[in-house]
Amino acid sequence: MNRKLNAASIQFNISLGDVDTNLKKALSAIDRTRDRGAELAVLPEMWSTGYDYKNLPRLALETPRVIEVLQKKSAEQKMVLVGSLPESENGHIYNAAYVIDQGEIKGTYRKLHLFSTMGEDRFLSAGDKTLVVPTSAGRLGIAICYDLRFPELFRKMALEGAEILCLPAEWPKPRQEHWRTLLRARAIENQQFVVATNCCGVQGKLDFFGMSLIISPWGEILAEGEEKGVELFATLDFQEMIDFRSKIRCFQDRRPTVYGTLP
Ligand SMILES: O=C(O)CCC(=O)C(=O)O
């Protein structure tokens, strides 16, 4: 049977440090995407707080409550939800993406590459594991924002069977072309779907351009956001991925013994 999936990206303007306002925005956007048939929705990076570094230790304590609400919403709407939140554990704060499938937390991924250019490494701790997780929406590979600049991570996830790359982000101007180019490259080189959600709006000195993207394994842009809050939709046709993979056999034709020992 030809498997298809309705995917959505939820792009919004994050209110810095205001968990309740952000939660409200996210919940109503999730309902709207479900009304339009979405089975998977990806929210931005650190969407409950934004990069409110100073207040993160306090704000991260609210995350368990946020996750509980999201679990309820995901169960009620029978959806898979992905997005990153500040996570507090043993005196460390992580930038953690949660994968919630019909109410159940299927996996958590802690951002591996912290964006030192903006001091992320001074306020947050890095994760040390990758995540590919089977869900009712397919096998999801998870990465966050700056991770996008490290292609080895994505090849590893593809080799582990990731079909859809979900990438929450807070990616600011003026690097729009890096965002677009790297996302398309990751989709094409790993022959997989990409659902990447950036936020929009201004937080302090940073101006976020939105431009969330849903991309096919062929590299075709199925949906793209502008600079304002918006929900994007696309139907992912898994047969197209299978056909492309059997026509251009990147996985079989690799030469890892020559250039590396990735699994
Ligand atoms: O890599 C970039 O240009 C942006 C990365 C970033 O803003 C982040 O990881 O928070």
Image: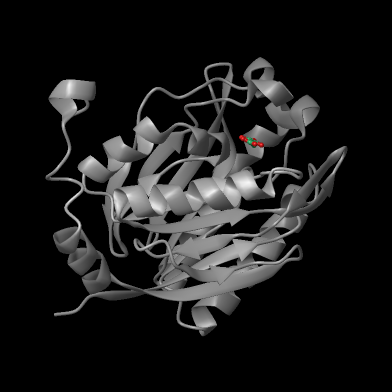
| Ligand 1 located in image quadrant | top right
Determine the image quadrant of residue 139: bottom left
User: Who's the residue at 71% across and 21% down the image?
Assistant: 119
Location of the N terminus (image quadrant):
bottom left
User: Who's the residue at 55% across and 44% down the image?
Assistant: 84
The outermost residue toward the right is 204
Determine the image quadrant of residue 114: top right
Q: Is residue 131 left or right of residue 247?
A: right
User: Who's the residue at 80% across and 51% down the image?
Assistant: 15
Q: Can you give x and y, in whole percent of width and height, for residue 101 in the image?
A: 36, 59
Q: Can you give x and y, in whole percent of width and height, for residue 76 in the image?
A: 45, 72
Q: Is residue 38 left or right of residue 2?
A: right
User: Who's the residue at 76% across and 45% down the image?
Assistant: 173
Q: Is residue 124 left or right of residue 263?
A: right
Q: Is residue 110 left or right of residue 160?
A: right
Q: Can you give x and y, in whole percent of width and height, for residue 58 in the image?
A: 72, 30
> Would you place residue 161 above or below residue 193 in this image?
above
Residue 215 visible here: yes
Location of the C terminus (image quadrant):
top left
The outermost residue toward the bottom is 36
Of residue 155 and residue 102, the one placed in the foreground of this image is: 155
Residue 260 visible here: no
Of residue 8 and residue 59, the one placed in the foreground of this image is: 8
Q: Can you give x and y, in whole percent of width and height, for residue 109 in the image?
A: 42, 37
